[in-house]
Amino acid sequence: MGTLSEQLFLDARTGDPSALGRLLDAYRQYLTLLARMQIDRTLRIKLDASDVVQETFLEAHRDFTQFRGSSRGELVAWLRQILARNLANQVRHYRGTKRRDLRLERHLGLAVDRSSEHLAEQVVFPGASPSHEAARGEAAVVLANALGQLPDDYRDALVLRNLEELSFPEVAERMGRSVDSVKKLWARGLAQLRKLMTETP
């Protein structure tokens, strides 16, 4: 992230649509991971996290002139709000509820924020202050981007075990694999993730 996304943010604020597109794309893996963590198991067959993120980006493009924040941290918080609203709309749609449910939107908004905080807590950067909100937000994005580079099975094992905090037998059941194979996938995924994180500038 760093200087490049800071420049993209500044260019997007001056009305450059290309910069806005590239800036939003830098948060794709992060938002997809947050969405995935909120989509109920029963809805995963019908609802794809990447579709919800694409809808979020379309709305962010459309409404960016209304964004009043002055930092990337505020932009990410704004994107999480849009994401939570879109998740709530999709849940209502698949449950056959027509009325807007503000309680569901608030609940999902808080859940998305908690997932983001939990994601940031998984990363410890030498010399970074964990209490510094901006650094924590960037850490969550960096981790999500690194997870996005892993093979699907490795990523699934890590997300289910470390982020959704399932036991190895629960992960094995969810993935349709043996406990032993899941443990191997998890260990290999963790090794690759650490390598990717140390290579991140």
Image (spheres, rainbow, N blue to C red):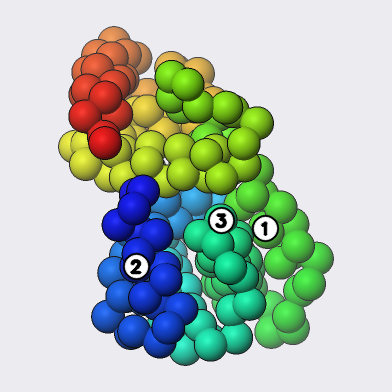
Asked if residue 138 lies left or right of residue 149, the reply is right
Q: Which corner quadrant of the image does residue 17 belong to?
A: bottom left
Residue drawn 31% across the image and 38% down it:
147
From this view, report whether residue 65 is shown above or below residue 91.
Answer: below
From this view, report whether residue 85 is shown above or below residue 112.
Answer: below
In the rendered structure, are the residues bearing label 1 and label 3 in contact, judged by CB atoms less than 8 Å apart? no
Q: CA distance from mark 2 to mark 3?
A: 14 Å
Q: Which residue is mark 2?
A: 8
Q: Which corner quadrant of the image does residue 83 belong to?
A: bottom right
Q: Which residue is mark 1?
A: 108
Q: Amino acid at mark 1?
A: Leu
Q: Is residue 105 visible?
A: yes
Q: Which residue is mark 3?
A: 73
User: Which numbered disc, 2 or 1, marks the residue that appears first in the sequence?
Assistant: 2
Q: Residues within 10 Å of mark 3 (few under 14, many from 20)?
A: some
Viewer-side residue, 3 vs 178: 3
Q: Amino acid at mark 3?
A: Gly
Q: Amino acid at mark 2?
A: Leu
